[in-house]
Image (cartoon, helix red, strand yellow):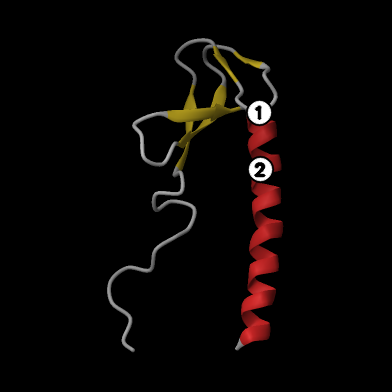
């Protein structure tokens, strides 16, 4: 079967695209509850199916990426064992 179109990503195609932003006002990290002060860098993750987003401090986002990497590695291993 021929592949058509751009290869989708599980991270950015409706599963919650992430973007680094500078807080324009005081925010709260969705994971740890710590304050993110105006002017601090943080990450906004889109909420699938809505126009909203979740905000994370850089420390928590690093933890989230680490966990995501572990899960992707596990999926890669399973995919390789099934080929």
The x, y position of residue 14, in whole percent, is 39, 49
Q: Classify mark 1: helix, strand or loop.
A: loop
Look at mark 2 in the image and give the residue it sits on: 64
Residue occupied by mark 1: 31
Identity of the residue drawn at 71% across and 41% down: 63
The residue that appears at 71% across and 58% down in the rendered structure is 70
Label 1 crowd bin: few (<14), some (14–19), many (20+), radius 10 Å:
few
Q: Which of marks 1 and 2 is nearer the N terminus?
A: 1
Query: Which mark identifies residue 76?
Result: none
Q: Position of residue 44 (x, y in %)?
A: 49, 32
Residue 51: give x, y in percent of width and height: 34, 31
* Image point (43%, 37%), residue name: 46
Relative to 53, is 3 above or below?
Answer: below
Q: Nearer the viewer, residue 30 or 69?
A: 30
**Which of the 4 image quarters holds residue 7?**
bottom left
The quarter of the rendered structure image containing the N terminus is: bottom left
Furthest residue toward front:
49
């Amino acid at each position: 079967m021929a592949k058509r179109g751009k290869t989708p990503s599980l991270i950015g195609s409706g599963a919650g695209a992430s973007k680094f932003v500078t807080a324009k006002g005081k925010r709260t990290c969705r994971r740890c509850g710590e304050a993110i002060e105006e002017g601090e860098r943080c990450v906004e993750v889109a909420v699938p199916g809505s126009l909203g987003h979740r905000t994370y401090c850089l420390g928590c986002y690093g933890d989230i990426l680490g966990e995501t990497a572990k899960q992707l590695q596990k999926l890669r291993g399973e995919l390789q064992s099934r080929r």
